[in-house]
Amino acid sequence: MSAAAGTRDDLQNRFRTHYCGRLQTEFENQAVTIAGWIHRKRDHGGLIFIDLRDHTGICQLIVQPEKEALFSEAEKLHAESVICVSGVVVRRSEETINPRLASGEIEVIVDGISVESDAAPLPFPVADELQTSEELRLKYRFLDLRREKIHENIKFRSKLISEVRRYLEDSFFQEIQTPILTSSSPEGARDFLVPSRLHPGRFYALPQAPQQFKQLLMVSGFSRYFQIAPCFRDEDARADRSPGEFYQIDMEMAFIEQDDLFEILEGMFKHLTETMSDKRITQFPFPRISYRDVMNRYGSDKPDLRVPLELQDVTDLFVNSSFKVFAGNTKQGSCIKAMVLKGHGGESRQFYDKAERRAKELGSAGLAYIQYKEEGPKGPIVKFLSDDEMNELKERLQIETGDVVFFGAGKWERTCKIMGGMREYFSGLFDLDRNELSFCWIVDFPMYEFDEATKKIEFSHNPFSMPQGEMEALESMDPLDILAYQYDIVCNGIELSSGAIRNHRPDIMYKAFEIAGYEKVEVDKRFGHMIEAFKMGAPPHGGIAPGLDRLVMILRDEQNIREVIAFPMNQQAEDLMMAAPAEVSPLQLRELSLKLDLPKE
């Protein structure tokens, strides 16, 4: 057999001539050989029906009683055993057609069965989507992956990666692999460290992202780079974050501005949505919302725009209020935010008690609200507000009978975040369209922030972003007013990626770090190799790295990221199937010149 033939998906050999899910009426009366797993077995009135499954789908087999030896052998078969079957394709009668199967118009009359692997009793069924503990599913992940839903998720992921590659290659990107063993990063999350046998006492680190390498590729003269990049971060699990490792669509481009990158990304997401799903993008091109605006309106820099709730600023209405709680928060740096829930003013007391508990969990002292009922406004703060304030509120917020308005007051950022948390809490009241993809760009992030604990100015996000206004801004503006060419891409409340136009000029980099309290010698010590490269001719460049796992999650309507990863870890960063992490032998430790100093239990 030629090498070329061996790469074909329709490979024919002694195990199979055809695939289960691809048998159609066009093969009627043909002799075939198929192979796979026994999905189900049923004995109906002397006939044995077997649903045989391979990666293309399911085909129904019939074993007839007149073939006694074959029938006897079929009776002993267990679910999930692997068999090869020879037989003849026949058309099903009209009343037995199964429209749910691709092969549902035919069945195979069995002439011979070869048992390749007899399955032991299973810890959970594969054919039926019964509720099974995640611990058991992860321990027997090879079985879990046979189940239809998760099997299709992994196939979808593979196709998505192929479409990403096709789109980016057609857009003149080169796929380049960057190192897995590298140096520890002084910034970001915790590194996974790898001890060096050849250099005792020294360590490699697994890359948190290929950030520095991809920037150096731009310095090396490559114009457009991408990679389906594995990234490693020693951080806790979340529903949308896999602990330990994850994959991202890593990208970088030279000689671009922010708009150029947005155009490429929007085109790619549009292509993937249209070719890989039945979903629709709400607005194209994607809306752009400044960081300040998104916090003011939604209380979060990753808003779900499908939720029909917005925060409104009512600070100016209470400057001279006799209600001291509100009046005291009208000074610079503080605010009063309101959020109207249309038609929910008549909810039970339990509804408001639960909402207040959630507000306290988010860090609020309580939750002020006013219900607008037929008999008039009700609520714990109504008695503290004047008639003029009540009237101005009603007019400003366009409140109608049956509505309720919730309030937050305090420091601007903290209040926005608390009210944003309440917006997310109330999102469950709305029937959100799961087929709607509300992408948006969050732009104009502040370059710096003031740390109340240290009383110092620090970088608020990525220190290697280019400040808007470049050197002139750093030399002439209040640092807290400087914005960065930094952006996030968000979809349905999930942040897919952060990115930036990079700072490629050493003089601007030194000045940016100086403002954050770093001396030149410290910058050189930490990032000298990058600065050295930039001194030798660096193009303007920028990039982004959308999370592959999260993108698959969104397009497959999954709530848990482990449902779209073939072999994920659990929430404690353990691989239950491979029993990792595991202890190593004393010999391995000696070879690495390591001794363990374990914490006392």
Image (tube, rainbow, N blue to C red):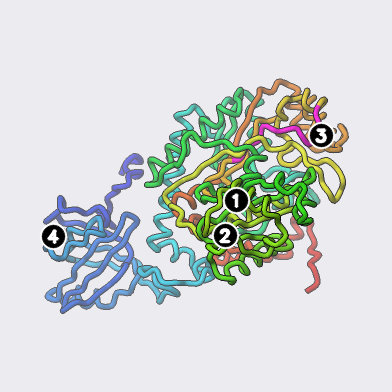
Amino acid type at circle 2 is Tyr
Q: Which comes sooner in the sequence, label 4 or label 2?
A: 4
Q: Residue 336: where, in percent of width, then height?
A: 70, 50
Q: Which comes sooner in the sequence, label 2 or label 3?
A: 2
Q: Is residue 122 left or right of residue 21?
A: right
Q: Nearer the viewer, residue 547 or 27?
A: 547
Mark 4 vs 2: CB contact within 8 A: no
Q: Which callout, 4 or 2, points to the residue nearer the camera?
A: 2
- Cα gap from disc 1 to disc 3, whole angstroms: 48 Å
Mark 2 vs 1: CB contact within 8 A: yes
- Cα gap from disc 4 to disc 1, whole angstroms: 72 Å
Q: Which comes sooner in the sequence, label 2 or label 1?
A: 2
Q: Which mark is residue 372?
A: 2
Q: Which mark is residue 90?
A: 4
- Report the residue at 41% width, 43% height from top: 280
293 is within the stretch colored magenta: no
Q: Nearer the viewer, residue 34 or 278?
A: 278
Residues shaded magenta: 477-488
- Report the residue at 25% width, 55% height from top: 102
- Cα gap from disc 4 to disc 2, whole angstroms: 69 Å
Q: Which mark is residue 513?
A: 3
Q: Secondary structure at mark 3?
A: helix
Asked if 165 appears above or below 299 in the picture, the reply is above
Q: Is residue 224 visible?
A: yes
Q: Which comes sooner in the sequence, label 1 or label 3?
A: 1
Q: Residue 585: where, in percent of width, then height?
A: 70, 65
Q: Residue 18: where, in percent of width, then height?
A: 25, 53
Amino acid type at circle 1 is Lys
Q: Which callout, 4 or 1, points to the residue nearer the camera?
A: 1
Q: Secondary structure at mark 1?
A: helix
Residue position for label 1: 394
